[in-house]
Image (cartoon, grey):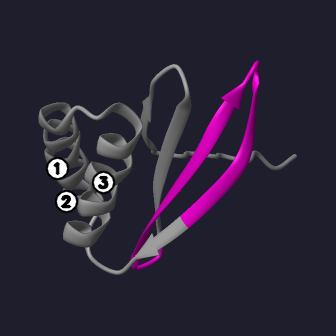
Amino acid sequence: MREATISVELFAWQNEAIVLLAERAGDHWVIARGWRTGDALRDVRCWTFASPRTFAGQVRRLIADATGDHRHAAEMSAAALTWAGDHV
């Protein structure tokens, strides 16, 4: 019998309205944003970035757009950059 090992390391953020999930895919970082509807996500959109800095910049923009809180968005962008750096 064979065993399967699945390991997914994600960067995640959510508020009342949206969810951001990000992962490393090969040489790129991918962000998915979905609008929460009960226990489902709708209108999911994805972005792919070749560098951790552009990835973290998109995290900042998406969170700032969702919350209007630029300080929190900058903090989460820094966290995303650290996360991405750990997955290089």
Instruction: Report, in whole angstroms, how far the alpha carbon at label 1 lies from the one at label 2.
Output: 5 Å
Instruction: Report, in whole angstroms, how far the alpha carbon at label 3 lies from the one at label 1.
Output: 17 Å
Q: Tell which tag, 3 or 2, sits nearer the viewer.
A: 3
Which of the 4 image quarters holds residue 56? bottom left
Residue extending furthest toward the right: 1
Q: Is residue 39 magenta?
A: yes
- Tell which of 20 and 5 is nearer to you: 20
Which of the 4 image quarters holds residue 29? bottom left
Inspect the image, locate mark 3, and give the three-letter code of the amino acid beneath it: Arg
Secondary structure under the numbered disc 3 in the rendered image: helix
Mark 1, other Cα within 10 Å: few <14 / some 14–19 / many ≥20: some
Q: Which residue is mark 3?
A: 61
Q: Which residue is mark 2?
A: 85
Name the quarter where the C terminus is drawn: bottom left
Above or below: residue 75 compared with residue 81: above
Secondary structure under the numbered disc 1 in the rendered image: helix
